[in-house]
Image (cartoon, grey):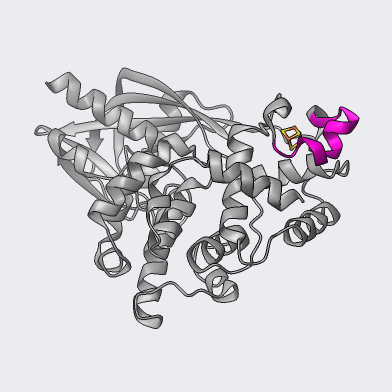
Amino acid sequence: MISQLLLDWYAKNARRLPWRDHSDPYAIWISEIMLQQTRVETVIDYFQRWMQTLPDIATLASASEQDVLKQWEGLGYYARARNIHKTAQILRHDYGARLPSEIKQLEKLPGIGKYSAAAISSMAYGQDAAALDGNIRRILTRLFDISSPLGSNGTEAQLRQLAQENLPAGKAGDYNQALMDLGAMICLPRNPKCDQCPLQPVCQAFMRGVQNLRPVRTKKKIVPHYTVCAAIIERDGKVLVARRKAEGLLGGLWEFPGGKQEEGETLAEALQREIKEELGVEIEIGAFFGKYNHAYTHFKITLHAFRCRILHGEPQPLDADTIDWVNHANLSALPMGKIDRLIALRIQQSKA
Ligand code: SF4
């Protein structure tokens, strides 16, 4: 009953999305990873550019990590891009540059978790695998009026079972995509549009009038906030940039050197200490260059940038993969995170 109502609705209301024009498992994989934590509207352009530049697994596997990160720049969560690149190399080496169809094999590949494996195997290979992401969890907790909190082991197992039990054999790809579309268009996180919902006749939360109280969430942790500073150091028309170590947050991306303010430090003291630790040089702090805010998944930062001048020493990559002096125009070619890109643009504009 649920799946039939859903599939009938999907047949008339499916969103037209560029990756749905591809039956190629590669395109489905790339779109699924891009869509994690990222809005569909944002992903569309990135996906189209990606498919033009890196149209298949072999091309992706041969590209440099820096080129891959540059393609990804602005999408955030850069570990996704590094994992896609690693996975392409594994696929070329072990699978003849093809994605496997088996969920267990897919789950072993870097960056492909339970959800992505189920989504890829159902959409690309027609396997009867139910995918479970945030949208689908929300719909199921409402449909079955589940009052235990999301995230607990019991709730997760119950949702997984319900998603699988209601899956129509042989139509898992459409079923998963229909749930995704319903979550994006109708069963919204706040104020679901129950009057337009094909599942209203079978929705237990709607019948009890508690749809806005589902899903139940455990209390959110307080997100820490850090104050960070960065140095714009110029010499002979070039600016100093450092490439972050490969692993960890923003790994492999370029940044203006600096770091976190510690308790009791002024911004100037923090920046002088960070530059000494990262590059081994003494600096003089000059004009304030700008203040930038950004929220990551588990913390927020406010970054203060300053123009700086080296007093003693020659910079060394003590706490970076490498460093470079770059012409302003060439800053555009380096993959960077959001804040560093804004600083780079401002540097380029100030010289224009
Ligand atoms: Fe969601 Fe409302 Fe539809 Fe229930 S009836 S699935 S709460 S939109």
Coordinates of residue 197 in the picture (x, y in percent): 69, 33
Q: Residue at x 45, y 59 (%)?
A: 29
Is 205 inside the magenta-drawn segment? yes
Q: Start and end of the magenta stretch?
A: 198-211
In terms of image quadrants, where is residue 292?
A: top left
Is 340 inside the magenta-drawn segment? no
Classify 97 as above or below 329.
Answer: below
Left or right placement of residue 307 versus residue 29 in this view: left
Classify 173 as above or below 205.
Answer: below
Q: Residue at x 80, y 31 (%)?
A: 211
Left or right placement of residue 3 versus residue 329 in this view: right
Principal SS element in the magenta part?
Answer: helix
Residue 179 makes an appearance in the image: no
Left or right placement of residue 18 versus residue 332 in this view: right
Of 270 and 216, nearer the camera is 216
Coordinates of residue 309 in the picture (x, y in percent): 24, 29
